[in-house]
Amino acid sequence: MGENYPKPREEIPGEFDDIRLLNDLAIAYHQVKDWDKVVEVYERIRAIEPWPDVMKQQSELTLRYMRHHAVMGEALCRRGEFDRVLAIFNDLKAVGSRFSDKYYFSGRIHTKKGDYRRALLEFKGMIANIPNRMRDVIRGLGDLIEASPAQAGIYKQFHLACQHKDRVEHYLDRCKKEMA
């Protein structure tokens, strides 16, 4: 986060028609947690490029100027617009392990919606592609276990996630204490 993003303004200047500038503005609003402004800026970006090709953007804009997708997903998630979030994050899967929140938020949304199979697939993808976010995977799988304790595949993924950090015994002890 050490990159220099502009300070957000009250009004979004009308002359901003460059995706790079609007991306930085969306990030600045994200940093001050002004979710409505994040959405407003993203809508301006979508007016410029209504159907973004993320693979093309990756080569032309670079990943730095694509963060607006991820922050928009988070802003819409906070608003409860889950179908839009899932569409944005599904598109971002084309860029691989970048923007790791796409798996986390998608898994949480599928859990909330009761689609436990898809939630498990998201967390499984996170285990395979984002090994440095195991704490979030474990948190998400814990919510999934709470929502659907009879789904055996969750426990296997939970065990795999715990093994990444050699934390199996720690989590088993904690679960035993909570169950006692």
Image (cartoon, rainbow, N blue to C red):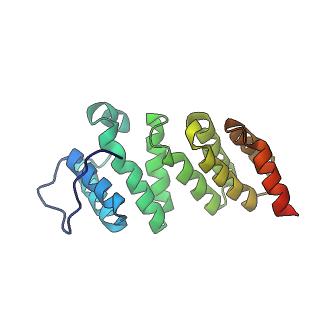
- Residue appearing at x 45%, y 68% in the figure: 79
Q: Position of residue 28 (x, y in %)?
A: 29, 56
Q: Left or right: where does residue 17 sit relative to residue 175?
A: left
Residue 57 shown left or right of residue 138 in the figure = left
Please, which residue is most extreme toward the left here?
Answer: 15
Q: Position of residue 98 (x, y in %)?
A: 45, 38
Res. 30 visible in picture: yes
Residue at (60, 52) in percent of width and height: 107
Can the viewer see residue 150? Answer: no
- Please provide percent x and percent y for residue 169: 80, 44
Q: Quadrant of residue 6?
A: bottom left
Q: What percent of the width, then of the height, locates residue 78? A: 46, 65
Q: How many marks?
A: 0
The furthest residue to the top: 59
Question: Which quadrant: the C terminus?
Answer: bottom right
Looking at the image, which is closer to me, 136 or 45?
A: 136
Asked if residue 134 is positioned above or below residue 62 in the image, the reply reads below
Residue projecting furthest to the right: 180
The relative height of residue 39 versus residue 94 in the rendered view (above or below) is: below
Residue ID at (57%, 58%): 109
- In terms of depth relative to the viewer, which is nearer, 56 or 78? 78
Q: Which residue: 18% across, 47% down?
A: 18
